[in-house]
Image: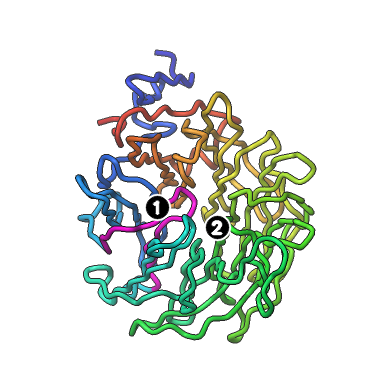
Amino acid sequence: MMVGVLAIAVLAGVAYETARLCQVPVVTSYPHPAGRHARLPRLVPLPDGGILMSWVESVAGSERYRLRFAVLREGIWLEPRDVAEGEGWFVNWSDFPSVVAIDPKFWVAHWLVKRPGGEVYDYDIAMAYSVDSGQTWRMAGSPHRDGIAAEHGFVAIFPDQGMAGVVWLDGREYFEGKNKPPGISGHFALRYTTLNRSGEFSREEIIDDNTCTCCWPAAAVSSLGPVVAWRGRTEEEIRDIRLAIHRDGTWSPPMQLGGEGWKIAGCPVNGPALAARGERVVAAWFTAQGGRPRVRAAFSEDGGSKFGLPLEIDKEAPLGRIGVAWLDDTSAVISWMKAAKGGLSEVAVRRLFPDGRHGPELRVAQLSAGRDSGVPQLAVVNDGILLAWTGPAPEFGIHMAWMGRDRLKHAASSISWVTFSGWHTSLCG
């Protein structure tokens, strides 16, 4: 064995770092408790430490689905639990359920339900809440109370002064073609409400009355208050990322983030990502303005009021589907899907700094470039980062990868990706 020479051996779909006898792997497949055919993972941090992963499972022999979650603490998964189960759910690769801890006890979940007798994209948001850390759940209803058969989805939930802030894309006033009825905008809107720990919603507010129809929004909470980002739209079909901050009970007018001027006649289905730490906020997004697909990021030092110049993360025709998280007080980490080649893509990560520096690109894992892989999820744990995504249809299955912090801080310019052909197999035993 040549010590100091990095070699990756791919055996039965599992990668080993032979130079270290698998003691310090570059990337490892991370075991998890989700069912064999589970899909649509979502990773969120817990206020008191640990990671909460939610996912969707189909109920064998039926047309029913189940929203489940499990908590990861100090490397150990706690027993999975159910939030809800039902039929008639709208299950989609880009618009998928979540479970979010507002505080250690108050948790909120959402999923999507088809409108009976409606069109394909007529569906409603269903929400539930728990006041005992997910042990029991109560229905809260829908954050939208319009009663109209239309698209309501792409939800982001976040802590908001002791309550759950909720934003979503709302199609109740959407109208295609001429002869728009009077009194409606004709557009999708980004709407907002709050849910308190008694299961009561506040009145609805409109943050932006002209948005893209299916690019998921993002939310984060700095020490100065919440910030949300989404893909806006103009009558000229410019679809750039916008942002608003919540201060003293009021949302700011929408602000441009990158301002690229991307003109596209349809929704690119590629939303932004946000993360906050103290007064600092990092935003990341995808654009293809000028026919040049790329991933960009920017930092704010004042809770999202102003952002610095964008950093170019990947200009080699990436697919996007971005995640971002703070690695420590001085740096963040971004994840994204690289360019498609032969129906496959790679999940890559890179360390970012507020002063504009960034680390090398590290390619973590290979996955389907199609919709079945969903939106890869990123979370920071004490000793490294976790990534999660859905395996290829029709079997699906959730795959997770772990990378140690040292690899991000002291990495070579690239490492070979890991092939995950099995079901959450584990490296090194």
Is residue 166 shown in magenta?
A: no
Q: Quadrant of residue 425?
A: top left
Could you tell me residue 352's position as x and y percent? 62, 49
Q: Nearer the viewer, residue 56 or 17?
A: 56
Please give the residue where the numbered disc 2 appears in the rendered image.
216
Q: Secondary structure at mark 1?
A: loop
Q: Quadrant of residue 422?
A: top left
Separation of residues labelled 1 and 2 (CA atoms): 15 Å
The residue segment tinted magenta is: 84-102
Picture layout, residue 367 above or below residue 246: above
The answer to whether residue 382 is seen in the rendering is: yes
Position of residue 368 in the picture relative to residue 208 (left or right): left
Q: Secondary structure at mark 2?
A: loop
Q: Residue furthest front?
A: 179
Picture layout, residue 17 above or below residue 185: above
Image quarter hosting the N terminus: top left
The residue positioned 36% from the left and 46% from the top of the image is 39
The answer to whether residue 111 is seen in the rendering is: no
The residue positioned 76% from the left and 39% from the top of the image is 291
Could you tell me residue 404's position as x and y percent? 44, 41
Please give the residue where the numbered disc 1 appears in the rendered image.
91
